[in-house]
Image (cartoon, rainbow, N blue to C red):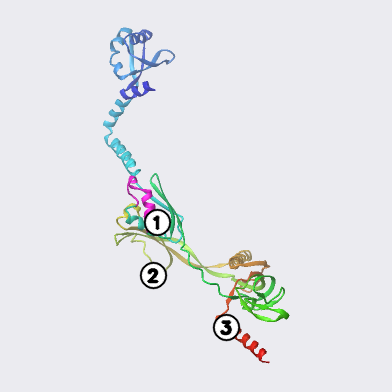
Amino acid sequence: MVHKILGWLFGYLCIRFRGEGMERFINLCHHHGINLWRIYPSSGGKEMVACISLKDYRRIRNIARKSKVWPRIAERHGAPFVCAAMRQRKSFFAGLVLFLGLVLFYSTRIWSIEIAGQSYHTQDSLLRFLRTQQVHIGMAGKQVICSRMEEQLRKQYEDIGWVSAKKSGSKIYLQLQEVRLVEAEAEKQPSHLVASCKGTVVQIVTRQGTAKVHQGDKVKKGAVLISGAVAIMGDNETLLGKQYVEAQGDIMIESKKNYHDEWEVRQKQKVYTGREKKIYQWDIAGKQFFLHNVLNRLERGKKYDIIREGGQFCDLLSAYVPMERWVTTYRFTEVQERVYGEAEADEILRKRLQKYLHQMQEQGNLLQQSNPVITRQGNKYVCEDQIVWWKKQQKQKKISKKKMQAEESEREQNGDHGNVN
């Protein structure tokens, strides 16, 4: 290994020699301390190949003359020849050195800050605060002190209970955990559990309160299902008073919904013509610069869709000078009439029905039955269905303090009259 390294540093040659005294040439080189390696025959044994150092090559002239061989250089290896090639291509190697230098320089900078775990605070607000603390994209990596960054974030944001900062390569990773400030829970106010829709009670389990309906009863919207007024009975079923609580229970109401949707056979639709115009915009330090093809004009009376894309141009430069790049695309459209077949209309109407069912399920409804029927009626396709839903009732109706006091005073008055009699 050392032999290879030294040979490359000082340079070596791969030579080919032929003649009557090839063996004598090798022996004389060994006798005079000239090192040859990788010796092997070539061209059917008519010549020999060997490697020799650049310094020893200058000493073999007399030896070659005595042994009557004619050496010639086949290959050149090592640093001296690389330097010679660099002198001939100065601009290329200068650019290569500059490129390597820039790579080494930029590898020591910070080019990305990734924040995870936040929900209340936005990433932009956190980055703006870090910028005020001299932590920004483009800073030197050796200036990053993770413990100091963690301490600054905890001091600035009281609702951040835990923060971890880690530097890996040219990137800073911030992991946050927000702690919502605990607020005193408001005193629970007594309430009734009421129906949020009309239908039939299919399931009822009372956990707290007094049930006012039974399984199979039909109820209207707003009807009291479980009352928050619990009667306190004494001996001989005597009403001693009422206790007001928050009504709780599991109640399912079955309701039916008549679904109706239509789709026209002939419809006018917007289609793209294929023509578009792009306008490039740069916002630099509050000034705007535009670039577009002036020959491709926007015509009056023509319709087009406008799509705007872009954002911050360069994180490094934007840390010092606000820079944004935007591309506004105008896609020209025209209105064409389209005739829908039965299969296309059926697929569209079923997709619209599935979207409606999905929205209703997100609202807490449980689908029990759906049998859509799609028919053509004149110039339109009609989808009709009677959908059966089950919905868990969770709507609460607060019991006002005035009502509780009125019932209490009425009960006391009734009791006083009884004593007088």
The amino acid sitting under disc 3 is Gln
Nearer to the camera, 61 or 140: 140
Q: Nearer the viewer, mark 3 or mark 1?
A: 3
Horizontally, is 192 left or right of 147 in the view? right
Instruction: Read off the residue under disc 2.
Output: 300
- Does residue 188 sit above or below 53 in this rendering? below
**Range drawn in magenta:** 136-155
Instruction: Read off the residue under disc 1.
Output: 154
**Residue 283 painted magenta:** no
Horizontally, is 147 left or right of 221 in the view? left
Q: Residue lying furthest front in this view?
A: 420
Within-10-Å neighbours for mark 3: few <14, some 14–19, many 20+ = few
Q: CA distance from mark 3 to mark 2?
A: 71 Å
Helix, strand or loop status at disc 3:
helix
In x, y percent, where is residue 139?
A: 32, 49
**Residue 150 painted magenta:** yes
In x, y percent, where is residue 207?
A: 65, 69
Q: How many marks?
A: 3
Within-10-Å neighbours for mark 2: few <14, some 14–19, many 20+ = few
Instruction: Read off the residue under disc 3.
Output: 405
Nearer to the camera, 196 or 71: 196
Residue at image point 29% right, 18% down: 55
